[in-house]
Image (cartoon, grey):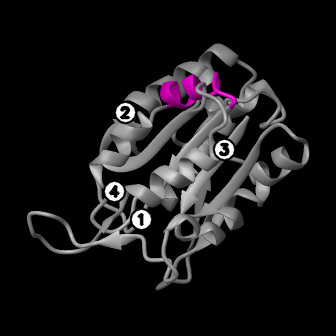
Amino acid sequence: MNFHVVTLFPEVVEAYTSASILGRAQKQKLLKVKAYQLRDTAGNKWGKVDERPYGGGPGMVLRAEPVVKAVQKIVKSKKAKVLITAAGGKPLTNAYAKALTKYKDVVIVCGRYEGIDARAKKALKAEEVSVGPYILTGGEIPAMAIIDATARQIKGVLGKFESLEESRVASHDVYTRPEILKIKGPHAQAWKSYKVPPVLLSGHHANKDAWKNKRLSNPNK
């Protein structure tokens, strides 16, 4: 599976996707991530890709032409999926990420400034995707979130199928050794002990799952 990211800051995407699990997955040829500098298709000697919005308003808007040209240079097949990061787009979920794995090529255009000229979306038949109900300074973080969430759905990326959290019972709280953790208070000499829930130390798997399910529905109890 190939991820193509069109961005003003390719170094940001490359730094994240070349490390840890995604970096290892690329070395194993389970997926490939390539970032493209949007200014390369600016069409002018200054590399200018933005203009003031029609109708007035603050900020700048990314021009449609550089975006369309960049994607057209990348896409060699009509089967490629083109995404644009946008706060008002379709929510990124595990189900959405899993659906993306049916595409060999996924192109992600990173939004910036006040957004991208809406005609680029129409020309590319692109789909807008949002990673949450908030505004970020650019689409690079959303692009990496899309890649990360999708990569986890590719067989072999996580090593073991059991590593996929959504396929098993997993509570918000997890524990490891030591069994009893002793922490000294900042304003007192006394030590306080924090214990692992006894049910997790038992060999009763049904009780463990019941406890995890309860924690999922009532995380504060």
- Residue kind at label 4, given as amino acid type: Ile
- Residue kind at label 3, given as amino acid type: Phe
Query: Which residue extends farthest left?
Result: 55
- Closer to the camera in the image, 113 or 44: 44
- Which mark identifies residue 3? 3
> Real-space Cα distance between discs 3 and 2?
38 Å
Magenta residues (range) = 94-104
Q: Main secondary structure of the magenta part?
A: helix
- Residue kind at label 2, given as amino acid type: Asn
> Real-space Cα distance between discs 3 and 4?
20 Å
Position of 22 compared to 60: left or right? right
Q: Residues within 10 Å of mark 4 (few under 14, many from 20)?
A: many
Q: Specify whether residue 208 is in view.
A: no
- Closer to the camera in the image, 142 or 199: 142
- Closer to the camera in the image, 68 or 153: 68
Q: Disc 3 or disc 2, which is closer to the eye?
A: 3
Q: Residues within 10 Å of mark 2 (few under 14, many from 20)?
A: few
Query: Which residue extends farthest right?
Result: 28
Q: Secondary structure at mark 3?
A: strand
Q: Disc 1 or disc 2, which is closer to the eye?
A: 1
Q: Residues within 10 Å of mark 3 (few under 14, many from 20)?
A: many
Residue 183 versus residue 28 in the image, above or below: below
Name the N-terminal-most of marks 3 and 4. Answer: 3
Q: Disc 2 or disc 4, which is closer to the eye?
A: 4
Name the N-terminal-most of marks 1 and 4. Answer: 4
> Residue 96 magenta-drawn?
yes
- Residue kind at label 1, given as amino acid type: Gly
Residue at numbered disc 4: 116
